[in-house]
Image (cartoon, rainbow, N blue to C red):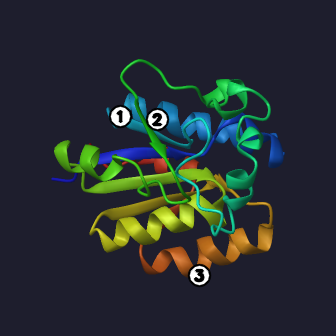
Amino acid sequence: MTKQALLVMDVQNAVVARYPDPGYLPRLGEAIGAARSAGIPVIYATVGFRPGVPEISPRNKMFGALAHNPAAAAAGGPQAMEIHPDVAPERGDILVTKRRVSAFAGSDLDMILRVGEFDHLILTGIATSGVVLSTLRQAADLDYSLTVLADACLDSDPEVHRVLTEKIFPQQAAVTTVANWKAAPPAP
């Protein structure tokens, strides 16, 4: 029997602000609500660093600028890195802090999934070409079954999102929409 978890990734205030789509958070909220109603645990993965960002190498192209300017990591205050209130965690949800793009990188996500005996992950998040792609690839390599809720993922480039969800992701995951998944989510 499959045991599933819904991953909600990088839906932090600072990230959501960079990807304006008024329909995104309501769709994601529907997926979260459907998961909770079906008894599927919700796991939030957020990117975060310690004060002074000792986890970041200056050689890292994506995060390296923060290594040179740790104050930039704190820009916007702590609320900038909080999960957006429209899809905020509830009691019983699991929170994971990651240190790189993939939800597995520098986090205890794999341990939580293995201890909970989860074998199927439903992926959502921002950005499709970032956390979703990186997490999907790593999860597939770790032998998890995968579903991607395409319209609960968001990218700054609609064409990149389309190519990933229509051509790349189906090689390793089932790809569907929130509405279709809600209509028939597999039993937890």
Q: Is residue 23 visible?
A: no
Label 3 is placed on what type of residue? Lys
Residue 49 percent across, percent down from the top left: 56, 42
User: Label 1, on which residue?
Assistant: 38
The residue closer to the viewer here, 174 or 113, is 113
Mark 1, Cα crowd under 10 Å, few <14 / some 14-19 / many 20+, is: some
Residue 17 percent across, percent down from the top left: 81, 40
User: Label 2, on which residue?
Assistant: 34
The reply to whether discs 2 and 1 touch (Cβ–Cβ < 8 Å) is yes
Residue 134 percent across, percent down from the top left: 52, 67
Q: Quadrant of residue 91?
A: top left
Which residue is at a point 41% across and 36% down the rendered structure image?
Answer: 42
From the viewer's perspective, is 42 left or right of 187?
right
The reply to whether discs 2 and 3 touch (Cβ–Cβ < 8 Å) is no
The residue closer to the viewer here, 102 or 20, is 102
Which element carries disc 1, helix, strand or loop? loop
Label 1 is placed on what type of residue? Ala
Which residue is at a point 20% across and 50% down the rendered structure image?
Answer: 114
User: Label 3, on which residue?
Assistant: 167
In terms of sequence position, does the residue under pointer 3 or pointer 1 come before the other?
1
Mark 2, Cα crowd under 10 Å, few <14 / some 14-19 / many 20+, is: some
Which element carries disc 3, helix, strand or loop? helix
Q: CA distance from mark 2 to mark 1?
A: 6 Å
Above or below: residue 144 compared with residue 38: below
Q: CA distance from mark 3 to mark 1?
A: 29 Å
